[in-house]
Image (spheres, rainbow, N blue to C red):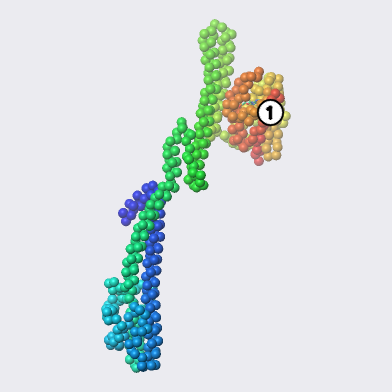
Amino acid sequence: MKFIEKLLRIVHYSQISTKITIIYTLCFLALLTLTNALAWYGVYYALYQQAERTLVYSMENTKKLLEKLEQNANIDVNSIRDPLVAGVVLRVVDDKGRVFIDTDSHYPTVEQFDENIIKDPPFWTNDDMEVAQFTRAIVYRAKMNFTHDNETVTLQFFRTITAQMDFFDKLKNILLTVDVIGLLFAMGTGYIISRKILRPISTMTKTAQDIAIENMNTRIPVNPVNDELADLANTFNNMLNRLQVGITQQQQFVSNASHELRTPVTVIRGYSDVLARWGSTDPEIFKESVEAIQSETENMQQLIEQLLFLARSDQNRQPLNMQPLELSELVEDVFHKMRKTTHTHEIKMIRNEVATVFADKVTMRQMLRIFLENAVKYTPEGGTVTVDSARDGDYIKLSVSDTGIGIAKEHQSRIFERFFRVNASGSEHKVSGTGLGLSIAKWVADQHNSKIELSSELGKGTTISVIIPIYH
Ligand code: ADP
């Protein structure tokens, strides 16, 4: 029992290929045992059947002969041998147990047979017959009574299957040899096939070990088949692709952020140097430097806040307090504040329809401010910024339009990318910005199951709308 437990534990912790080989071999062994047993019993059964049939046939023939004998007393008693099938021995025994006809005197005697009778013969043995087991032979016996002139004799028919026993020995050897060869073959093929099938897994393990952040280009070779291992390899490769894209974006983000931070820091340093040298003596330089430093610090602060926002949103850590919100109140509030602080542009409202949305107030406000600030930033002084919020079926469409510089067709799909800014250096309209505002607005819209639409024409103006589902 202990040994089996130990063996099972070894198998449990062994490699899959070893397990497959063992299972394969065991199945093969079970199949071999079954076929052997069937062959064995089949042959045995056939031999018993054959012996039984010869005995029955001999008995029937003898019976007919005896009937004739009764009618015609002239028939020779010795002719009793004639109806016997080859191999069948007949003994006629009287009621005192004396044998007075014996067709083969070398055969085991009736007493010897009686001593060696098997108590539990195989189940296929005829119930009317008896079986005796000798060292090298099995003997079958059938009995028949015959009464003549008030005298009863017993006819005992014997049939041996000695010759067939040799055949059994041969059969045993053949089966054993075939079994051993079969088992070795099963073990060999089981091992080779399982190794071959599982080879891609070893390759995968090796590839996974080789992959590092600096070396993300390695991929698992995928066999052109449609099996589970190819699926696994494809899934693994796809995962690597996604990771690689993510890591590249991350690296790009870090490098862009550092780049963006460098400009204000350089400006601040420049002005602080100027301040240190001439600030105390020249009030004009003092004023200009301090203003520049203040403005750059503000820019930097905004940039850092936006960066932090995106970092939090990437990690799903940006808190969102979603609740039913009256959008018109929020629009009204942001609109008024904007109008109060902006004196360079005309800010108008067309409609502000009542609608409840399920939203986070803070980020919703942030999105609306981004649209309004952009509209003002990218519209020359004296231009108009228009807010329009109108219901459309189950949605509310909140639009901010301007009469500004517009966005060229080729840039329209890119303005939602992080750090993307239309290069304004060529134009006379230079404004400060980070290129992060619209990517934040896009994230907020996504979180509210809302869609952003953009329509813009260069030199004419831009309309940016967000379509928010109404909360019922
Ligand atoms: P920022 O405004 O800080 O540069 P945004 O992500 O808000 O960054 O905008 C990305 C770019 O899209 C801007 O740099 C600008 O070129 C363009 N853009 C955004 N809004 C407008 C607008 N209303 N009119 C024209 N261009 C705009």
Nearer the observer, 262 or 301: 262
Q: Is residue 76 left or right of residue 388?
A: left
Give the amino acid type for the residue marked by disc 1 in the picture: Ser
**Is 42 rendered above or below residue 228?**
below
Instruction: Point out residue 435 in the picture as x, y percentages from the top left corner.
Output: 59, 25
Q: Is residue 121 left or right of residue 386?
A: left
Q: Does residue 123 show up?
A: no
> Which residue appears at 51% of the width and 46% of the height?
225
Instruction: Point out residue 62 in the picture as x, y percentages from the top left corner.
Output: 37, 85
Query: For the C terminus, which image quadrant?
Result: top right
Q: Report ligand 1 position as a quadrant.
A: top right
Based on the displayed image, in which of its 4 quarters is residue 340 positioned? Answer: top right
Q: Is residue 281 left or right of residue 410?
A: left
Nearer the observer, 373 or 164: 164
Task: Answer yes or no: disc 1 within 8 Å of ligand 1.
Answer: yes
Q: Residue furthest top?
A: 281
Q: Label 1: how many residues lie within 10 Å, few (<14), some (14-19) or many (20+)? A: many
> Which residue appears at 38% of the width and 53% of the height?
187
How many discs mark residues in the rendered view?
1
Query: For the N terminus, which image quadrant?
Result: bottom left
Q: Residue furthest right?
A: 350
Residue pointed to by mark 1: 456
> Which residue appears at 37% of the width and 72% of the height?
47
> Which residue appears at 68% of the width and 39% of the height?
394
Disc 1 secondary structure class: strand
Nearer the observer, 174 or 352: 174
